[in-house]
Amino acid sequence: MSAGANKVRGFVFDIDGCLVRGPRAIPGAPEALATLRARGSGIRFFTNDSAKTQAETAERLTAAGVEATAEEVLTSAVVAAAYVARRFPRGRVLIVGAPPLRVALEARGLSMVDAPPADAVVVGRDVDFTYAKLHAACRAIWDGAAFLATNLDRRMPVAGGFVPGTGSLVKAVAWATASRPLVMGKPSVWAGRAAVASLGVPPREVAVVGDQLLQDIRMGKLAGTSTVLVLTGSSTREDVERAPARLRPDAVLADVGHLTEWLAK
């Protein structure tokens, strides 16, 4: 945890429910980020969505009014690709996922295969999930491939409600193979380490800012950063009061617009 808010030099922001709501920026968010940039703070945006590239995510943020570049975006697919490339240099990877997951893995020099043998299986968001894909992933894991998941999210918010999240696909593979995946996205230690490393400053000088205790705040705690919960999304002040000490954020703010006030303390 940071020694003080005024010592924070890097920020890792959640996106939905923290900076944007649907196609629009949450009031105060664009101004707060502009202030942070003006003071020289490093900024990263982290999403568990493996079905969007870094550029697509940056474009979405910018269109909503939140300035962002592709280089500032981290996705669970990018974290997974970096891990697999370290463990299996130029290895063979079988994916259950969308094209952006394949792009992230191929950018690391990894080869994609549609059937075993494979060194690793990576399961991400896949709206075209089929029994054939499930079978191929299971066969590879039964034959010894490492099993990774981009995230275990139960559901994703969309216009008009929710859709099943990546976790539903991961669970299908896990159940059939009687195995547990190594999870790459929030709130894993891999996600937190990648975010902090990309900023190039010590964890104690980084703050993770988000709207979910079990995702954003937990990731920050595991990574050793300061943590800030904003009340514009999922978790409430009552959730904070009921949470165990290990999940309580260092600060609870009405919205990201109040972040500069916290930093001035």
Image (cartoon, rainbow, N blue to C red):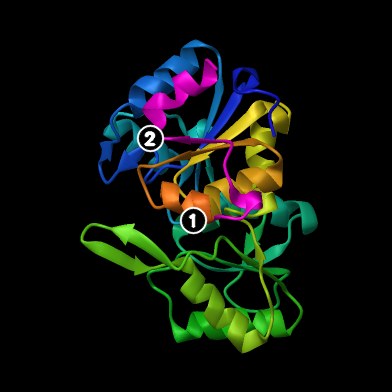
Q: In front of the other: label 1 or label 2?
A: 2
In the rendered image, residue 258 lying in the magenta stretch gets the answer: yes
Q: Which residue is mark 2?
A: 254
Classed neighbour count for the residue bearing mark 1: other residues with Cα under 10 Å, few (<14), some (14–19), many (≥20): many
The x, y position of residue 175, in whole percent, is 60, 85
Q: Residue at the spot x=43%, y=81% of the render?
A: 130
Q: Residue furthest top?
A: 38
Residue 198 is one of the magenta-drawn residues: no
The kind of residue tagged 2 is Ala
Where's residue 211, x and y in %?
44, 45
Q: Is residue 59 above or below residue 132?
A: above
> Which residue is tagged 1?
50
Q: Is residue 26 above or below residue 172?
A: above
Which residue is drawn at the image coordinates 71% and 33% (left, top)?
A: 203
| Tag 1: amino acid | Ser
User: Would you call the spot at circle 2 few (<14 residues within 10 Å), some (14-19), or many (20 or more)?
Assistant: few
Residue drawn at 41 percent across, 49 percent down: 236
Say what secondary structure mark 2 lies in: loop
Q: Nearer the viewer, residue 142 or 49?
A: 49
Is residue 45 something one can see in this rendering? no
Highlighted magenta segment, given as a residue range: 243-265
Quadrant in which the N terminus appears? top right
Whether residue 229 is visible to the viewer of this picture, yes or no, is yes
Q: Secondary structure at mark 1?
A: loop
Q: Which mark is residue 265?
A: none
Inter-mark Cα distance, 1 to 2: 29 Å
- Kindly identify the residue that appears in the image at 39 percent across and 72 percent down: 128
